[in-house]
Image (cartoon, rainbow, N blue to C red):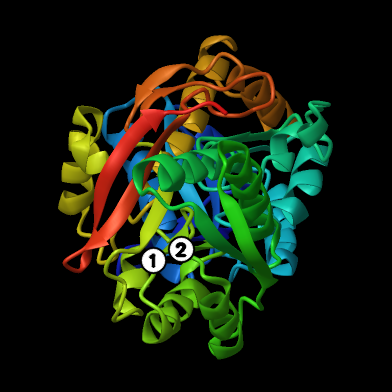
């Protein structure tokens, strides 16, 4: 049977005629096996700037692995799907990856809420998932992690981003100790990521001696925040901490500055060039993000050069380095599985099982630094960075490996 395989490349749509599905795995002549890595992110919609950076960075990892012949006999391809930052679409995408038995692992998604809809089906299928961006602590440590009853819910889930427990605590410490802010108004968008981040921030900020002078929740689709801004002004807050993402965070910040001159601080969901594009009064705002700025890492110089040379029209954004490492972790797992299986990767579920088993052995020097995973599937790299908007761009202020 003739199969038409659709391959998305930068600026072009290519249709490639292949043999049967079995021939495709064997490379037709038995010399090359094609291995597919799924990529799930919001390619369209408000968060597409981050999602396109994820898609492109995963694509680059596959291309470089092929160019460098990282796994002899294996050709890597990526299969990008758009989740539109919607959990229901993410769940549908998970099933599409599961149904395609050439897919041995999935990179993504961006949103913790989307991941919650993908984890179980991917786990049931034994399909490895590595997110470069999810920070919701419960995704790896279970719902009772706050009481130190940590239970890994899904053995197939890993991430190269650290948790909100770490990020929220780091943000609170930075705002209290470095920015010298003692009174904060706390707002979140009621989504798993935003609410979890705000809760973690609150716990550490109050422990340090800071005061939460008011709390509120907003709808992430809202763009008129005058009501909550009025409350903030009356509270006497010296800063607002917002648990959410830049599409709502940018107008919230701008409307805040129209009324009271205090900074807005958020997490990695705010750390995007688009936050500044959407906000004419972003000066002085603060965000935290996972890892150290790739531009400051010697380990990222080749990634930055290769990304530029590849000609992607979209920036790699906040999660480019982490995405490259997430994709490369699956590539490394394939390499281990092939080496342990006589130089070939078995087909179907056997391939997925061997790749998953190999993830526990993955350890390498990545774009963002050393890459490996602990017993929960969390990254062992807890580096965090605080950024502040200065003269129309994010400027790094403090980077450190942080543990609450």
Name the side, left or right, on which 372 lies relative to 377.
left
Alpha carbon separation for disc pair 2 and 1? 5 Å
| Disc on res. 138 | none
Percent of width and height locating residue 338: 53, 18
Of 283 and 128, nearer the camera is 283
Q: Which quadrant does the N terminus fall into?
A: bottom right
- Please name the residue shown 58% across and 58% down the image: 2
| Disc on res. 263 | 1
268 up-or-down from 256: above or below? above
- Please name the residue shown 79% across and 26% down the image: 148
Decide which of tag 2 and tag 1 comes sooner along the chain. 2
- The reply to whether residue 250 is visible in this rendering is yes
Residue 73 position by quadrant: top left
Percent of width and height locating residue 121: 80, 47
Q: Quick check: marks 2 and 1 in contact, CB under 8 Å? A: yes
Q: Mark 2 points at which residue?
A: 239
């Amino acid at each position: 049977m003739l199969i038409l395989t659709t391959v998305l490349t930068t600026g072009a749509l290519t249709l490639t005629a292949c043999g049967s599905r079995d021939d495709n795995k064997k490379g037709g002549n038995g010399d090359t096996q094609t291995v597919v890595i799924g990529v799930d992110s919001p390619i369209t919609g408000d968060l597409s700037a981050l999602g396109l950076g994820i898609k492109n960075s995963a694509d680059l990892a596959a291309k470089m692995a092929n160019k460098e012949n990282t796994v002899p006999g294996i050709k890597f391809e990526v299969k990008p799907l758009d989740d539109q930052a919607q959990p229901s679409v993410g769940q549908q995408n998970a099933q599409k990856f599961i149904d395609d038995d050439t897919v041995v692992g999935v990179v993504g998604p961006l949103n913790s809420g989307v991941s919650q809809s993908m984890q179980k089906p991917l786990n049931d299928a034994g399909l490895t998932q590595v997110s470069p961006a999810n920070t919701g602590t419960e995704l790896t440590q279970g719902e009772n992690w706050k009481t130190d009853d940590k239970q890994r819910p899904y053995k197939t889930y890993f991430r190269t981003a650290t948790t909100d427990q770490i990020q929220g605590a780091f943000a609170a410490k930075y705002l209290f100790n470095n920015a010298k802010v003692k009174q904060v108004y706390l707002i979140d968008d009621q989504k798993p990521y935003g609410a979890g981040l705000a809760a973690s921030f609150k716990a550490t900020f109050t422990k340090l001696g800071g005061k939460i002078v008011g709390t509120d929740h907003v709808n992430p689709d809202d763009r008129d925040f005058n009501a909550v801004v009025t409350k903030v002004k009356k509270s006497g807050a010296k800063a607002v901490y917002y648990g959410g993402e830049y599409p709502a965070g940018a107008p919230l910040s701008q409307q805040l500055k129209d009324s009271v001159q205090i900074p807005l601080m958020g997490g990695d969901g705010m750390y995007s060039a688009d936050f500044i594009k959407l906000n004419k009064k972003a000066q002085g705002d603060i965000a935290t993000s996972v890892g150290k700025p790739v531009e400051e890492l010697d380990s990222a110089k080749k990634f930055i050069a290769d990304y530029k040379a590849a000609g992607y029209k979209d920036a790699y954004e906040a999660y480019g380095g982490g995405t490259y490492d997430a994709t490369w972790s699956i590539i490394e797992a394939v390499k281990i599985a092939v080496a342990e299986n006589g130089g070939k990767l078995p087909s179907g579920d056997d391939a997925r099982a061997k790749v998953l088993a190999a993830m526990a052995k993955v350890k390498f020097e990545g774009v963002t630094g050393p890459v490996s995973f602990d017993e929960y599937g969390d990254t062992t790299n807890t580096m965090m960075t605080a950024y502040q908007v200065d003269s129309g761009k994010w400027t790094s202020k403090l980077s450190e490996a942080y543990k609450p």
